[in-house]
Structure formats: structure tokens, C-alpha cells
Image (cartoon, grey):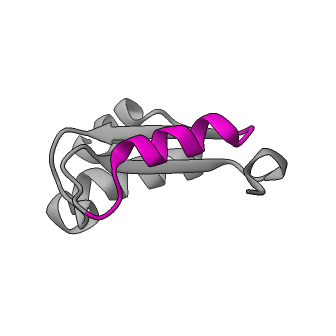
Amino acid sequence: AGLPSLAPELILIAADDDPMVPASVSTRAALRAPQASCIRFATGGHLLHEAEPDTIAALIEARCLGETAVDAQDRRRA
């Protein structure tokens, strides 16, 4: 309900095969919050952070550092 007034940047990470929270819910939430984005994965389910821990950690770290996910992947390889 308060998403339109949410000031901090928000990143929503969702999986299309999540049986608990449909990815469309995250997508709609991202459209309502002013500084939000939604990154969707085809698979990973409700525990996407456990299914793809390195990928999810890289996305969060990149956002905190002001990088893109691609920058983070390149930095991790170095």
C-alpha cells in the first residue's frame, strides 16, 4: 500500500517458478515503488537465494556498489 511513497532504492529478485509468491507480484510491486527494479529468473523457486547463492550475492553486491550485475561478475572473475 505504501510502495509509491517508498524512498529507498528497492531491488526485487523473483523466480518465475516460485510456488509461494508469483513473480508477477514482484513485477507489479516494482512498478509501484519509485526507485524499484525487479530481476526475474526462469527457475530457482521460492528459495532462489539458496538455489543460486553466488548469482544473487553478486546482484546485491553490485547494486550496493553502484555497478551492474555484469560488472560484478567481471570483478569476481578477476
In the rendered view, does 44 fall on the left or right side of 23? left
In the rendered view, does 66 fall on the left or right side of 51? right
Q: Quadrant of residue 56?
A: bottom left
Q: What residue is shown at x 24% (from left), y 43% (from top)?
A: 16
Q: What residue is shown at x 15% (from left), y 46% (from top)?
A: 43
In the rendered view, does 35 fall on the left or right side of 64? right
Where residue 42 appears, x then y in whole percent?
18, 39
Where residue 71 appears, x then y in whole percent?
40, 33
Look at the image and give the residue range highlighted in magenta: 20-35
* Quadrant location of the N terminus in the rendered image: bottom right
2, 69: nearer the viewer: 2
Residue 35, compared with residue 49, is above or below; it is above
* Quadrant location of the C terminus in the rendered image: top left
Query: Does residue 28 belong to the magenta stretch?
Result: yes
Magenta segment main secondary structure: helix
70, 1: nearer the viewer: 1
Query: Does residue 53 belong to the magenta stretch?
Result: no
78, 1: nearer the viewer: 1
Where residue 55 appears, x then y in whole percent?
26, 50
Q: What residue is shown at x 78% (from left), y 57% (from top)?
A: 2
Where residue 28 appears, x then y in whole percent?
54, 39
Count of marks, rendered view = 0
